[in-house]
Amino acid sequence: MQILVTTDNHTEGHARLHDYVQTKVETTLARFQQRVTRAEVHLSDQNSSAKKSDDHQKCVVEVRVNGLKPMSVSHNASNLELAVTGAVEKMERALAHTLDRLAETHKSGSPKAAGLVM
């Protein structure tokens, strides 16, 4: 799985941060490594604008899964570590849910049985 980490121009993207993000994504999404070809992690500081809030650090995780459209989640938190953890855990749940439903579809032979077709 290829992992790409980007930051906005208000977030310092030092090597330690990149290493943390890479390790977090690799360990949390390890069970999906055969299906996920690429993960993109975008970090930003939402307080750079006029609005102020406690949860001003944002992490967006987008993954590319073989045979599916890209999936994306985001999480806001008070610091980058919490934002990354929250977003990566959300992605883990989203991948598990999506891939479990696909597995059900293949077992039953009917896309409607898994709720994937309206």
Image (cartoon, rainbow, N blue to C red):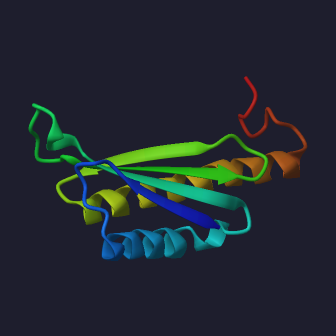
Q: In x, y percent, where is residue 72?
A: 52, 44
In the image, is residue 79 above or below residue 98?
Answer: below
Q: In x, y percent, where is residue 9?
A: 28, 48
Residue appearing at x 55%, y 64% in the figure:
3
In the image, is residue 91 above or below residue 18?
Answer: above
Q: In x, y percent, where is residue 29?
A: 56, 67
In the image, is residue 3 above or below residue 15?
Answer: above
Q: In x, y percent, where is residue 17?
A: 33, 70
Residue appearing at x 78%, y 37% in the figure:
113
Is 104 or 17 nearer to us in this picture? 17
Is 48 or 59 nearer to us in this picture? 48
The extreme right residue here reads 109
The extreme front residue here reads 9
**Left or right of 88 in this view: 69:** right
Count numbered badges in the picture: 0
Q: Which quadrant of the figure contains the C terminus?
A: top right
Which image quadrant for residue 47? Answer: top left
Residue appearing at x 39%, y 46% in the figure:
74
Residue appearing at x 70%, y 47% in the figure:
101
Which image quadrant for residue 12? Answer: bottom left
Q: Which quadrant of the figure contains the N terminus?
A: bottom right
